[in-house]
Amino acid sequence: MATERLSFAGFLLFASSLFSRVATGEPPKIQPFTFPMQVELGTQTSVYCGLSKGTRPIEFSWKKNERTLKSVDGKIHILTPGGSTVLEIQRLGSSDIGNYTCIARNSAGEDAYTSSLVVEGKVSEEGAVSI
Ligand SMILES: *[C@@H]1O[C@H](CO)[C@@H](O)[C@H](O)[C@H]1NC(C)=O
């Protein structure tokens, strides 16, 4: 009797874990990305953050040096058409140098990937004087 009750409980546990797996789906996995090399001051750049897997809907966000990035007219554009996101940075200045993190989240989990933006000309601002 007792074993029957136990196995019924076990079946419920098994069934509910199956159900939650179906309900939550597959956690997102971000494909590694890098900013273009030799980005110049005053120009613009963009970087694409896509997924190799992950059940939709996916919620994307960006961080710069651990702080959440928001779109700013004429400066930062974040485009999220669905299963991916693009970060565009205009009028590049030395203050844009830093580590940019793409975060993807769904009901099953979360993934994050960080890439550094290097802007050419930052060093030569002072270095140019000494030439
Ligand atoms: C970016 O990350 C690298 C490696 O973790 C670190 O050395 C560097 O200081 C970071 N840059 C900024 C601006 O936080």
Image (spheres, rainbow, N blue to C red):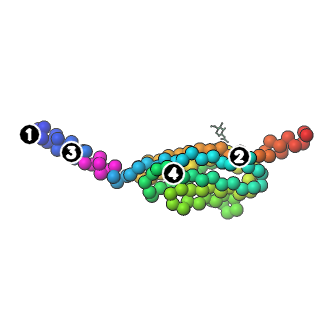
Q: Which residue is mark 3?
A: 11
Q: CA distance from mark 3 to mark 2?
A: 55 Å
Q: CA distance from mark 2 to mark 1?
A: 70 Å
Amino acid under label 3?
Answer: Phe
Q: CA distance from mark 4 to mark 2?
A: 22 Å
- Stretch in magenta: 15-21
Amino acid under label 2?
Answer: Met
- Tag 3 secondary structure: helix
Give the x, y percent position of residue 18. Answer: 29, 48
Instruction: Give yes or no for residue 20 being in the magenta stretch.
Output: yes
- Ranked by sequence position, the earlier of labels 3 and 2 is 3
Q: CA distance from mark 1 to mark 4?
A: 50 Å
- Ranked by sequence position, the earlier of labels 4 and 3 is 3
Amino acid under label 1?
Answer: Met
In the picture, the quarter occupied by the N terminus is top left
Are circles 4 and 2 on residues that touch, CB within 8 Å?
no
- Tag 2 secondary structure: loop
**How many other residues sit within 10 Å of disc 1, few (<14), some (14-19) or many (≥20)?**
few
Q: Which residue is mark 1?
A: 1
Q: CA distance from mark 4 to mark 3?
A: 35 Å
In front: mark 4 or mark 3?
A: 4
Q: Which residue is mark 2?
A: 37
Instruction: Give yes or no for residue 27 being in the magenta stretch.
Output: no
Give the x, y percent position of residue 98. Answer: 67, 45
In front: mark 3 or mark 1?
A: 3
Q: Which residue is mark 4?
A: 51
